[in-house]
Every structure is written in structure tokens, then in C-alpha cells.
Image (cartoon, rainbow, N blue to C red):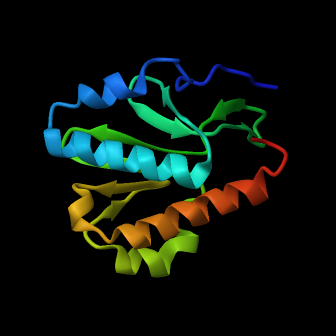
Amino acid sequence: MTNTANKTQATGDDVAAFIAAVPDAGQAADAQQLCTLMQRLSGAPPALWGPSIIGFGRYRYRYDSGREGEMCRIGFSPRKGQTVLYLTDGHAGHADALARLGRHKTGKSCLYIRRLADIDLGVLETIIAGSLAWMAQTYPDQP
């Protein structure tokens, strides 16, 4: 069994200070709004994972390869020029909602947005809630 430590781990660093240090004031305001939204939907307080991911909740995973670790159930990162939302369930179950979301890009399990003003926040809430529901079904015995 491979148990290499995950590079991205909860740090205990101050989330409010991290958001306050985001250089772009608009992106910092978006980060605060996302933090409030994700905390409300997840029921978990925000925590910094690695140097730049604000995550909510946690779960343990184990791949067929034997690699295992722990990660936040849902999270986001205000990166230069865009905010990345991490949807552990990917995009397959969100195709209809993504079509209505507004201006965005997707990656493997990432949703990239430039500004919250570019998207429909109600649709985003539906996507986040769906991802959290998938996590609860896939990892039911974990907080």
C-alpha cells in the first residue's frame, strides 16, 4: 500500500487573513462571498488547505493504487485572474447547470470563474449543493 503524504493538507492558517491578503479587491470580495456560501451549504467552517485552497469539511480517500489521503469535501482558491472551485464529483452531473451558469471554464474537477458577477449565483449554489450531496453519498460515514 502506498501512503505518500498528500501535498495539500489542512494548515490551520487564518482564512480571514488569507482572504484579506488577496491583491485584487474584487476577487477578495468574491472570496469572502464564496466562503460564506460554502460554509452555509457545507455546514463546515473554512480551513486553509495548502497555501491557497479554502476548503470545507474533509474526507478520506483511497485509490485502487493504494494511495490514500485526506482532502476538503469542497473548496476554492482565489488565483491570479480567476477563482478556482474544486468539485470533487467532476462535471458530468452538472452539465445542465453549467450550461446556465454564465461565463466559466472547466478542468478535470475544477470550475474556473473570473468574477461572481459573471455567473448566476443561484446556479452556482445548485452546483455546490449537488457536489456536496455526491460527497455525502460517496463518503457517507465521514464528516
Q: At 47% across and 65% down in the image, what residue appears?
A: 125
Residue 9 picture quarter: top right
Q: Is residue 133 or residue 62 the one in the foreground?
A: 133
Q: Is residue 71 or residue 122 the one in the foreground?
A: 122
Q: Is residue 18 or residue 87 the one in the foreground?
A: 18
- In the rendered image, residue 63, in percent from the top left (x then y), is placed at 74, 41
Above or below, 126 relative to 14: below
Q: Is residue 40 or residue 100 the one in the foreground?
A: 40
Residue 19 picture quarter: top left
Q: Is residue 139 left or right of residue 52?
A: right
Q: At 57% across and 63% down in the image, what residue appears?
A: 129
Quarter occupied by the C terminus: top right
Above or below, 84 relative to 97: above
Label count reads 0
- In the rendered image, residue 71, in percent from the top left (x then y), is placed at 62, 35
Above or below, 137 relative to 103: above
- In the rendered image, residue 49, in percent from the top left (x then y), is placed at 50, 28
Quarter occupied by the N terminus: top right
Q: At 60% across and 50% down in the image, what residue appears?
A: 42
- In the rendered image, residue 35, in percent from the top left (x then y), is placed at 42, 44
Q: At 14% across and 37% down in the image, what residue appears?
A: 24
